[in-house]
């Protein structure tokens, strides 16, 4: 037997066996803020159960397994029949099944549905992010399908169901279904009006066959897809099921799966329609973008929430590690320089969470004021929050040192996941241009945004100066495209600052306004003014494990 050469010391325990929801003070406070009192206890208990599952050892193992064993494309069965199926590791199905049965595709018909669903999405995403793509697509398909009440009557109950059934069968034979989306093509990318996929009408009203390709198809194993194609009347939205009512497979050829930087557990595909691919029109011919934009808006909010989830998990891991790891005579968390880094990261995470839940609450409100607010706030938030995710994940990884660079820590997976939400559903320039479009064509959107931030005026002099500077920028929209990113960044930062001044503890709001709005910080994390109450910010961000 080999002699023991040393005893392992000074290694933090794994961050496991904790309630991801209850340990996130920014999130729990937001839920309390927006959920009606009569339902608050029920919602908090529901989210706490999900949080305990997300922080459990088995959920963490599922996440590791789903990413270690990516999906595999099976174009044919053993007899040579074309099947076009995607095979996943059982861990993927456990993760996705838990998400569906927990109601993460069911927001549109429940009271406080978007807040409770967005909070749950933020919590469960921290167990593993890849499988939340079909969760997001399925949730977001509902408002687009409502453009056709007949289709919505069939599919909405299945898409919002809490039943997970992975087998491909006719809709009438399923207790629950998943939805995917196929918009972009190789020649157009985000310019979907350049799509060349053709839709030829059949004799039956609303029925077509499609011919063409899609360069990115999200969640290709799903039961049904929303697709854009050129009909005689112009670019149109279609619903395309994988299995037809008679039980036969629709013509849906999966050419290959994408080999992606991150998001390894999730399948993204290139697909072909061969002229026999049957689809139903959703909305009017020529109104495809207007129809599917409701789905895009909902998925953009999920991009914000998903980025907030990656940031929160990265910060939780960094703070947890530094609380237990000792160096230079004491715990890292007590070292002034490391405390500054952790506090700076925690500010970014809390600002992202607070903004994501405010957007979810606006969806629940449904008021004209909030609908107008979302028109500007969603693309601005999508632009800024998702862009902050990668530097947060990278800096949090560095807090773990060499341990963080090792796959076993889970930090490399977070870092690879971090850029995704900035790219999906329209990358940075697309979001910036969408904000400009709203500013130029929809004055009610700007009025709603200004009303939102105006509720915080007078509470912090740095926020007041930032609002004044923003108004100066907004006063001149000539030649605005070249400075659109600068403007959208300011829109998002001022909105985050206003929300934190209203709702966050004074030390959090003070630090955010000083660094993000007042300019008292450097270009890297860990450059906050040393006079701030950094210890309180870090303590607030520390996950509670019950140790």
Image (cartoon, helix red, strand yellow):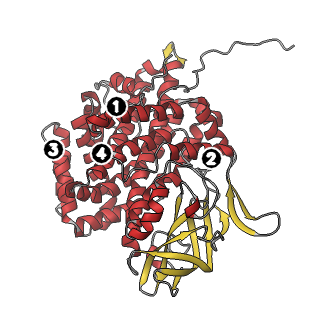
How busy is the neighbourhood of tag 1: few (under 14 within 10 Å), some, or many (20 plus)? Answer: few
- Separation of marks 2 and 3 at Cα, in angstroms: 45 Å
The residue at the point 42 percent across, 28 percent down is 23
Callout 4: few (<14), some (14-19), or many (20+) C-alpha neighbours within 10 Å? Answer: many
**Circle 3 residue:** 455
Name the residue that disc number 2 marks.
Answer: 93
Q: Nearer the viewer, mark 1 or mark 3?
A: 1
Residue at the spot x=55%, y=63% of the render?
172
Between the residue at mark 1 and the residue at mark 2, the CA separation in whole angstroms equals 30 Å
User: In the picture, which quadrant includes the N terminus?
Assistant: top right
Kindly check if marks 1 and 4 are in contact, taking CB atoms under 8 A apart as contact: no
| Closer mark to the observer between disc 2 and disc 3 | 2
What is the x, y in percent for residue 98?
A: 55, 42
Tag 4 or tag 1, which sits nearer the N-term? 1
As drawn, the residue found furthest toward the right would be: 1
> Circle 1 sits on which residue?
41
Residue 143: x, y in percent?
38, 62
Number of marks present in the image shown: 4
Pointer 2 local density, CA inside 10 Å: few below 14, some 14–19, many at least 20 = some
Q: Is residue 120 above or below residue 56?
A: below
Q: Which residue is mark 4?
A: 358
Residue 18 is at least partly visible in this image: yes
Q: Residue at x 50, y 74 (%)?
A: 188
């Amino acid at each position: 037997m080999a002699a023991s050469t040393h005893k392992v010391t000074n290694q933090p325990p794994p961050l496991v066996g904790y309630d991801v929801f209850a340990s996130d003070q920014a999130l729990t406070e937001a839920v309390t803020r927006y959920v009606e009192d009569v339902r608050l206890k029920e919602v908090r208990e529901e989210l706490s159960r999900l949080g305990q599952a997300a922080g459990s050892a088995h959920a963490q193992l599922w996440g590791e397994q789903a990413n270690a064993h990516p999906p595999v494309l099976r174009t044919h069965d053993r007899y040579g029949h074309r099947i076009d199926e995607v095979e996943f590791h059982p861990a993927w199905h456990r993760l996705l099944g838990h998400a569906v049965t927990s109601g993460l595709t069911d927001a549109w018909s429940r009271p406080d549905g978007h807040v409770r669903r967005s909070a749950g999405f933020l919590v469960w995403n921290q167990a593993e992010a890849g499988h939340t793509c079909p969760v997001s697509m399925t949730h977001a398909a509902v408002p687009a399908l409502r453009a056709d009440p007949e289709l919505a009557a069939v599919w909405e109950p299945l898409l919002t169901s809490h039943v997970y059934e992975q087998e491909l069968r006719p809709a009438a034979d399923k207790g629950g279904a998943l939805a995917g989306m196929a918009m972009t093509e190789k020649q157009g990318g985000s310019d979907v009006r350049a799509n060349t996929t053709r839709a030829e009408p059949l004799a039956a009203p609303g029925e077509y066959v499609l011919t063409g390709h899609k360069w990115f198809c999200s969640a290709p194993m799903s039961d049904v897809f929303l697709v854009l194609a050129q009909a005689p009347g112009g670019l149109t939205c279609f619903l395309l099921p994988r299995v037809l009512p008679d039980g036969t497979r629709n013509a849906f050829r999966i050419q290959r799966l994408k080999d992606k930087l991150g998001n390894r557990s999730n399948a993204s595909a290139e697909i072909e329609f061969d002229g026999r691919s049957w689809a139903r029109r959703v909305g009017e011919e020529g109104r495809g973008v207007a129809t599917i934009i409701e789905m895009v808006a909902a998925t953009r909010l999920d991009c914000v929430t998903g980025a907030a989830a990656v940031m929160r998990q990265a910060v939780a891991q960094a703070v947890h590690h530094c609380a237990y790891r000792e160096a230079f005579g004491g715990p890292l968390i007590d070292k002034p320089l490391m405390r500054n880094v952790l506090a700076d990261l925690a500010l970014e995470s809390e600002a992202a969470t607070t903004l994501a839940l405010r957007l979810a609450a606006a969806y629940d409100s449904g008021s004209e004021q909030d609908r107008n607010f979302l028109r500007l706030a969603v693309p601005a938030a999508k632009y800024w929050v998702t862009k902050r995710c990668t530097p947060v994940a990278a800096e949090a990884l560095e807090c773990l040192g060499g341990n963080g660079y090792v796959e076993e820590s889970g930090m490399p997976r977070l870092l690879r996941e971090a850029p995704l939400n900035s790219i999906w559903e329209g990358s940075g320039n697309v979001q910036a241009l969408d904000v400009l479009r709203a500013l130029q064509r929809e004055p009610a959107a700007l009025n709603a945004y200004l009303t939102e931030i105006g509720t915080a005026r007078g509470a912090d002099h740095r926020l007041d100066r930032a609002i004044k500077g923003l108004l100066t920028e907004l006063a001149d929209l000539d030649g605005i495209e070249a400075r659109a990113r600068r403007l959208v960044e300011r829109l998002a930062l001022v909105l985050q600052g206003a929300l934190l001044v209203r709702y966050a503890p004074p030390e959090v709001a003070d630090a955010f306004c000083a660094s993000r709005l007042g300019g008292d910080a450097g270009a890297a994390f860990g450059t906050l003014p040393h006079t701030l109450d950094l210890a309180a910010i870090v303590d607030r961000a520390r996950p509670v494990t019950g140790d």
